[in-house]
Amino acid sequence: MPEVLKAPLVVEFPFTRSLGPVQSAFLTGLRERVVLGVKTRDGRTLVPPVEYDPVTADELGDLVPVGVTGTVTTWAWNPAPRRGQPLDTPFAWVLVRLDNADTALLHALDAPGPDTVRTGMRVRIRWAEERVGAITDIACFEPYDADVAEVPVHAGEFDEPVGGIVAEARLDYTYSPGRAQTAYIKALENERRAVGERCPSCRKVYVPPRGACPTCGVATSEQVEVGPAGTVTTFCIVNIKAKNLDIEVPYVYAHIALDGADLALHGRIGGIPYDQVRMGLRVEPVWTEGGRYPDHYRPTGEPDAEYDTYKELL
């Protein structure tokens, strides 16, 4: 069996969200070295605070301060910190019930080793030197053997409250396209051929192949060369320039049904003004020197395809 491709893949994007009055007060409090919880109707104090009671669904808004010291309720040792985690040396993930709180807060505990961490140990917040109104304003927790720290009095009102946060979402993993797509990629890269696979049951040809028919659910293995020309089935005009993509806007991105295929694939349309691209336009691939896949598709000059020839591929 030929070697199956695999490669590291990173998916990341900034996630921006606005804050309601409860979350705004909590994060603004961290900026000011104050930890706020929220009271429920039955007298529990929830930290971190939430807008609605998770038990009764009551709307919550009665903010109260809690301690900056607390007790570890459970923990797990992290011997190999990853990018973006609170500490760059081994540490413990801990759930800490802060003094005067009834729920626990998840964060990192700076400890020399797992033998120094235990359930029930006392800890305190180590504040970040620069605080901006985010959970990272708590740099971590650290062991604390002194008396319980006094809980400050605070009404939960601040000047210049934090109104929103931006969280960098990132996923690192190793992706493998599988046997079928590996053959498709290698044929494109080495021979500039588009190779799909035919379903043994419904006889449809899928490009790129997935190794199984999405309609019948049976495995596919019969390879079928398709294209290179095809038909634009649907398209969109892109007016927003993408980061790290050196293509001037506006441009057209389309679904293209290659000749002989029963599934349309994605491709950029070039060699024609964007406002002249249309459904049924016949196109062919354009390769750049050393390219591993077509750079874009351009008109072939043929008459447009009849709608009935591609309507099932929309």
Image: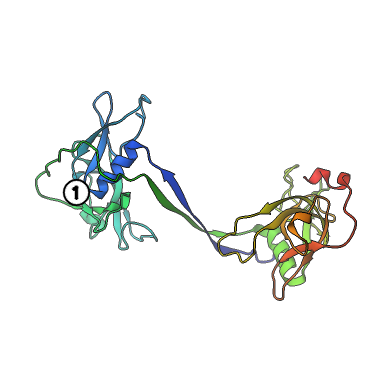
Residue 113 located left or right of residue 12 = left
* Residue 136: x %, y % from top left: 31, 53
What is the quadrant of residue 308 in the picture? Answer: top right
What is the quadrant of residue 154 in the picture? Answer: top left
**Above/below status of 97 relative to 258:** above
Residue sitting at x 33%, y 46%: 162
Q: Quadrant of the N terminus?
A: bottom right
Q: Foreground residue, 60 or 88?
A: 60
What is the quadrant of residue 67 in the picture? Answer: top left
Q: Quadrant of the C terminus?
A: top right
* Residue 40: x %, y % from top left: 28, 27
Identify the amino acid type marked 1: Val
- Label 1: which residue? 123
* Residue 232: x %, y % from top left: 79, 53
* Colour scheme of the rendered structure: rainbow
State the SS at label 1: strand
* Residue 183: x %, y % from top left: 72, 63
* Residue that sits furthest to the bottom in the current view: 289
**How many C-alpha atoms fall within 10 Å of the one at disc 1: few (<14), some, or many (≥20)?**
many
